[in-house]
Image: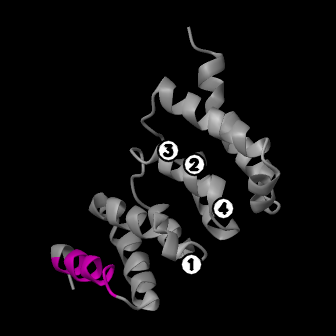
Amino acid sequence: MEGIESFDFFFSLLSNEQHKLKNIAAFNLKEIGDSRAVDSLFNIALNEENIGKNGSMLYALSGLDCSRKFKELFQILFYHDYEAKAHAYNILSEQEFEFSKEDLIEIRDEWAAIKDSPELLIRLKGSKEMVQDAIDQYLYYLENES
């Protein structure tokens, strides 16, 4: 398969019911490197039914332009399993993002609420430092605002 045909084929597999086929499609879309798949991969990854089995979607996203998905990546860091968090952290560390001051304030405030909530904090299961590091990377922009 070449170019558009292979993208279309693998992209169509993302809507398949079988999780293994979705993973195969995601890996191939990462290899193709066509960022038209970003929104669909995020929709699958953020779907509550896929929490705990969305690591492949996040891995695939690491090879695509996620610059418009800043807040979504923090949602994954805050509320998803460790594998998804690790991929989201890597994306946040390696790519450049479009975000506003309001986005940063919202993320900062949500993180503060999580830290103040024992039931939410326990869900971080050993990833609190990773999440804090990602927060610190971006809150720097608020602190150094002119």
Q: Quadrant of residue 33?
A: bottom left
**Is the residue under label 2 in contact with that under label 1 (CB below 8 Å)?**
no
Q: Residue at label 1? A: 53
Q: What residue is at 23 percent from the left and 80 percent from the top?
A: 6
Q: As rendered, which of 19 and 90 lies closer to the eye?
A: 19
Depth check, front residue: 54 or 37 = 54
Between disc 1 and disc 4, whose residue precedes?
A: 1
Tell me the CA gap for discs 2 and 4: 11 Å
Task: Report the amino acid beneath label 3.
Answer: Lys
Alpha carbon distance from label 1 to label 4: 13 Å
**Label 2 SS:** helix
Label 1 SS? loop
Q: In the figure, 109 relative to 65: above or below?
A: above
Q: Nearer the viewer, residue 122 or 5?
A: 122
Q: Quadrant of the C terminus?
A: top right
What are the residue bounds of the magenta stretch? Answer: 5-16
Return the residue at label 2. 74
Q: Are marks 4 and 3 in contact (CB under 8 Å)?
A: no
**The residue under label 2 is which amino acid type?**
Phe
Identify residue for label 4: 86
In this rendering, the label closer to the viewer, 1 or 4: 1
Which residue sits furthest top?
Answer: 146
Picture quadrant where residue 43 is located? bottom left
Q: Is residue 130 above or below residue 1?
A: above
Q: What amino acid is at disc 1? A: Lys
Residues at marks 3 and 2, CA–CA distance in whole angstroms:
5 Å
Would residue 139 be found to the left or right of residue 6 on screen?
right
Q: Residue at x 52, y 68 (%)?
A: 59
